[in-house]
Image (tube, rainbow, N blue to C red):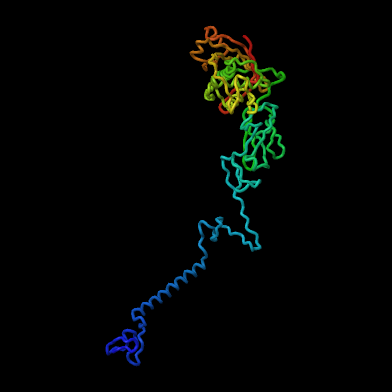
Amino acid sequence: MYCNRCGSQNSDGAAFCRGCGAPLRPGAAPDPYAGSGGGTKSRGALMLAILGMVLTAVLAVVLILALRTGPSPDPVSGADGSSDPSGIPSADPFSEEPPTSIPATVIPADPETDGLASVDGPDSTGADPLPPDSVKVFFYEDEREELTLAVGETVKLNAVAYPADRFPNAAFRWSVSDESVIQLTVSGDTGECEVLCLKHQPGSFTLTVECEGVARQVKIYTRPSSPTTAPTTAPRRLTLDRAGQERVNSFLSNFSEQGFGSFDVNTASFDQMIRFVHIYCFLNRQDMITYKNNEALIAVGDVNVQMRRYFGKMIYPNQGDSYDNGAFYYSGSYFHFPPADGEDYNYFTVVDELLDNGDGTYTANFHVYELILFEFRARGISDSYYYLTPDQVDELIEVGNVTLFAAGTATLVDYESPGIVSYQLLRYDTWEA
């Protein structure tokens, strides 16, 4: 039997065409799985349609859930998915409400920046905050971290914030640790300050200048001024133990071993003090000397350390620039000396009495002794000579180890710094014994 619709041959008893599914006999219902492409193709199309509907339903559910929960936060961008990492929504330009203000963040105190907290953001000048080392204090052109002042002495200091062109109107605040010793005179909030020493007191005092949250400190040491009138009370003779005898003997021996001449700290030239420092370093502090091109070089900072230590004075670059006296000269932050000539510095001092003048000064009456040459070359000026009392040195004279060279007197004041308890020299004079 052939199908009238598609012409396919079918068995005689078939009710429907195997090719197109059309009824072969009148009254037969069409095959529901039949199609123009055959039964297998019709069933595949139906399965694809069902799968498409399922996928559509799944996507619809996912979209609904996403709309309900909102966008997921981005760890790099803001909380609302914007590019602002602060997490605070940007102000709506069309809203009548003002934008939310963001407070400045206070940074905790850092012990390396003097314990001063700073505020994150521009300072009062609109520039970036000052770095910790941007405030400097100058005396003339010399940056200072310490000063020594005599009673009644006044100096003018100037503080600068760097870079100066970015902080032309920086405001400074000055203070001092003890106003009964150091008096400050400041004009407004400028960087200029006048410092006056009111009285002598052992130890150091701290001068602080602060600018834009950054503080700079300068140590100030004091010393008595040389007395211009006789003491109002009789000097009191001090009893020296072994340590006290050694302290004053060794201090004055630093001068006698050089053949130090008459000296008054108020009238002496810096030449005399600088030459003293050179020989002192040659004999005691070779670590402070650099030898180059047949010269002995000592940095101006090391010269200042010894000048303050022994005289309460310091040299400043603008003064040092003028030194070229043939004996030494100043250049490139160094004093240049000819090498020491190797002469024998074989003198030492024994103090006969130390008097307390009652005004913060002492009078030391002493004798200078010369160690005989072979003894000196064998032993040098050993520490044993600095402990000698007048009676003990007389015994050395009798056996011929030393000879009396000169007599003298000196005016001293106390000097203290970390690890040092000694004196500073105000006046010194010797004469033939």
Q: Where is residue 344, by image quadrant?
A: top right
Query: Is residue 7 shown to the viewer in this render?
Result: yes
Quadrant containing the C terminus in the rendered view:
top right
Residue most extreme to the bottom? 26
Query: Total label count?
Result: 0
Above or below: residue 383 compared with residue 32: above
Q: Position of residue 159 (x, y in %)?
A: 65, 36
Residue most extreme to the left? 12
Q: What residue appears at the point 27 percent right and 90 percent down from the top-left corner?
A: 12
Q: Where is residue 312, by image quadrant?
A: top right
Query: Is residue 240 shown to the viewer in this render?
Result: no
Quadrant containing the N terminus in the rendered view:
bottom left
Q: Nearer the viewer, residue 223 or 189?
A: 189
Residue most extreme to the front? 7
Q: Nearer the viewer, residue 310 or 321?
A: 321
Q: Position of residue 407 (x, y in %)?
A: 62, 11
Q: Is residue 429 left or right of residue 1?
A: right
Above or below: residue 258 compared with residue 298: above
Q: What residue appears at the point 41 percent right and 76 percent down from the top-left corner?
A: 49
Above or below: residue 304 compared with residue 92: above
Q: Nearer the viewer, residue 214 or 175?
A: 214
Q: Position of residue 93 (x, y in %)?
A: 63, 61
Q: Is residue 192 left or right of residue 86?
A: right
Q: Nearer the viewer, residue 34 or 85?
A: 34
Q: Position of residue 18 (x, y in %)?
A: 31, 84
Q: Where is residue 289, by image quadrant?
A: top right
